[in-house]
Amino acid sequence: MLKSPLYPPIEPYAQHSLQVDSTHILHLEECGNPLGVPILFVHGGPGGGYSPIHRQFFNPQHYRIVLFDQRGCGKSRPHASLTNNTTAHLIEDIEKIRRLLGIDKWALFGGSWGSTLSLLYAQAYPERILGLILRGIFLCRQQDVDWFYQSGANRFYPDYWPDFIAPIAPEKHNQLINAYHEVLTGHDEIARMRAAEAWSIWEGRTSTLKANSGIVSHFGDPFHALAMARIECHYFFHQSFIEDNQILEHSQSLKHLPIYIIHGRYDMVCPINQAFELKATLPKANMTICEHAGHSAMEPEIAAALIQATDDFVLGKISV
């Protein structure tokens, strides 16, 4: 059995509840070294939440590790809520967390939607960023969403696709995001839960190069699936509340930062062209292509590359 590249499990030294508006209370935690380099773990989805294993991507002696659940997911409340849940809200939530913790500047570590949100926050607050470590780049354009939820990834997973479209009436298969949004925001609780599990399991099944039953089981958990499906679909139905090519058009504001891009060659959730398109606008960014991996941060080659990046960053080896 291969040795895990992750650092050993650790526990938080502080946990916080942050009321960000009249509806939402965010859960966040700090672990590692209180005097270390501040770094924020930005989870995927939107709606994915963080897990204890995500603490293990960082050397706890060198990093002050901050993790939080975005609006509506994980331990944040209310669960699966779409009220006041937009990209602009999430960007400002991150800034509120920074101010709460008294952090002047910090690094951001995000994968998939976490890379999207990290880039958008960095573009809004470049003066607060020490650097970015990004995995599974998701530019969140309509073409990127359509690839995974309408036409593209289905050609590689014809065995899984029927389960994904099963909750949707056949006459609505040509507009799956719209149809899913209707079900996931509807009043039929049974239909809503069935759709949520189908939506989330589709992502779990396609996230790894080799099938991983543990990841699929996690994605299929009803509590996780409801938040993931409702929030993801809510965002994608609304074009993620950003302009279609917003990240690339504003990436020049980040060119002075140390940036690490890590992407699986066979990523079917967020195809690798997105990493290359981002890299083209940030030519000094460091990019690692994992030749035997898909999308998940838990795949051994990607996990090892992420650990290498966090180690290099804290030692000053990642530069512009």
Image (cartoon, rainbow, N blue to C red):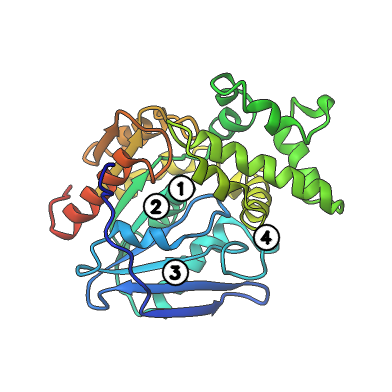
Q: Which residue is mark 3?
A: 95
Q: CA distance from mark 1 to mark 4?
A: 20 Å
Residue plotted at (28% across, 49% down):
4
Q: Say if mark 1 contacts mark 2, CB within 8 Å.
A: yes
Helix, strand or loop at mark 3: helix
The image quadrant of residue 71 is: bottom right
**Which x, y percent locates residue 12?**
38, 75
Structural distance between the alpha carbons of marks 1 and 2: 8 Å
Please tell me which residue is depicted at 37% across the width and 31% down the height of the picture: 277
Q: 248 left or right of 155?
A: left
Residue named by callout 2: 110
Q: Nearer the viewer, residue 318 or 278?
A: 318
* Label 4 vs 3, first from the N-terminus: 4
Q: Earlier in the sequence, mark 3 or mark 2?
A: 3
Give the label, 1 or 2, closer to the camera: 2
Q: Is residue 153 above or below residue 24?
A: above
Q: Amino acid at mark 2?
A: Gly
Q: Does residue 6 appear left or right of residue 149 in this picture?
A: left
Give me the residue at 62% from left, 47% from top.
220
Residue 256 visible to the viewer: no
Give the CA separation, mark 3 to mark 2: 16 Å
Q: Are marks 1 and 4 in contact (CB under 8 Å)?
A: no
- Residue holding disc 1: 116
Badge 3: residue crowd in 10 Å (few <14, some 14–19, many ≥20)? some
Chain-order first, disc 2 or disc 4: 4
